[in-house]
Image: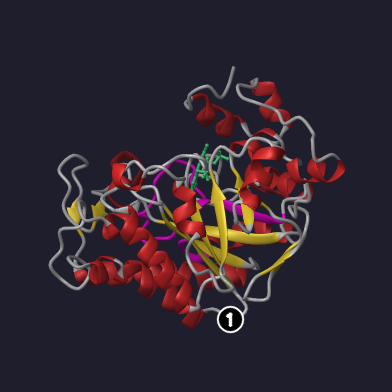
Amino acid sequence: MEHNLTAPLTFRSGHQMKNRFALAPLTNHQCEDDGMANDAEVKWLRMRAEGGFGMVMTCAAQIESGGRGQGFPGQLGVHTDAMLPGMKRIAETLKNTFSVVQLHHAGIRSPQEVIGQQAVGPSAHEETGSRAMTKDEVQNVIQDFISAAVRSEKAGFDGVEVHGAHGYLLTQFMSTELNQRSDEYGGSYENRTRIVREIIAGIKRECSEGFSVGIRLSPEGYGMPLTEVTRFCQELIDDGSLDYLDISLWDCSKESADEEFQGRSLLSYFTDLSWGDVKLVVAGKLKTPADAEAMMEQGVDFVMLGRAGILTHDFPNRYKVDPEFEATQLPVTAEHLESEGLSPAFIKYLSGWDGFVK
Ligand SMILES: Cc1cc2nc3c(=O)[nH]c(=O)nc-3n(C[C@H](O)[C@H](O)[C@H](O)COP(=O)(O)O)c2cc1C
């Protein structure tokens, strides 16, 4: 059967991917303590660009100028101008692909031992000991997201992806459970999604017309019903600012956790939206060429590989030569990961993931 995984894709910003393979954002703990990109980070990403990925995205990169949004030790920083030399090194390395920075704030999930202060979020949260942000702080964080995008463009990247998934700050604001605010950033659906809409509008306002903007969202969960997420996706598509929506499924073939929506794939609720010229990308257990082809058949525009991109740095190039090549499967040895360009810090982090390192 004919598949178009090797066909180029043009976004509304004018940027082009040379094929339909994107490297998923992958946290790796391997940058310097202050967030500066180093040789390890450059090598890991360079190998994926050379391996043929049409889009290479950085790991979640911290954006808050005060350092309060950091979620992990050794996390890439794009939060101050001091980070520009490292950012420029990465952008230069990714010149032969579509390069994207993932903009991230961990909110109440910022570990106190990493940020050295109390974590903040939309509302106070007993379990994590975090406190509610003032309205000024919310507006400062919106500006920090925007400034990080401007900085990414200045460093030479093609675009940014706003990380609105996985229970981090922006999900916390959108959540009916974690957001208990009574100002214009809490309460109604309109108010809970305001922070994301203001960030996207600000990036469009302050970056060049051709700078690419995408967003990653979780399909449901974290106090966000599927119907709200699909409604928000449709509004974002209709708004005309985005190049793509990245739906983080963790398992592309799964069904909704909500009984009401079971009986068909969770993905189908998203392919059913009216897409216009906004593109859809998904990630989640796409391990083999056949898995990626199946997504294209279901109406996805391009695919994101996380673990498969870790295991095989040149997955797209291999696919081009042999669309039936046998992909490496987990678990693998530390030596294998080293040969795929991972640093000791990254390998150590993956050792904590179930069934990864032998
Ligand atoms: C080690 C590791 C680190 C990750 N880091 C990030 C991240 O920084 N940002 C993000 O949005 N998702 C992150 N994810 C999720 C991946 O981007 C991807 O959506 C997920 O792994 C499912 O795809 P896969 O089955 O191809 O790995 C991470 C996943 C893994 C395994």
Residue at the far front: name it. 263
Q: Residue at x 65, y 68 (%)?
A: 156
Residue 278 image point, x, y percent? 56, 70
Name the residue beneath numbered marker 1: 208
Q: Is residue 191 left or right of residue 150?
A: left
Q: Is residue 68 visible to the viewer in this orientation of the structure? A: no
Q: Give the vertical position of 243 relative to 131 (above or below).
A: below
As shown in the figure, which amino acid type bears the numbered disc 1? Ser
Q: Residue 158 appears in which quarter of the rendering? A: bottom right
Q: Secondary structure at mark 1?
A: loop
Residue 64 in the magenta stretch? The answer is yes
Is residue 53 shown to the viewer in this render? yes
Q: Residue at x 56, y 37 (%)?
A: 285
Magenta residues, start to end: 54-81
Q: Quadrant of residue 114?
A: top left
In the picture as drawn, the residue positioned furthest to the left comes out as 182
Q: Position of 54 compared to 194: left or right? A: right
Asked whether 99 or 66 is in front, the reply is 99
Query: Can residue 67 be found in the magenta stretch?
Result: yes
Q: Residue at x 64, y 71 (%)?
A: 11
Q: Residue 83 location, x and y as percent?
A: 54, 60
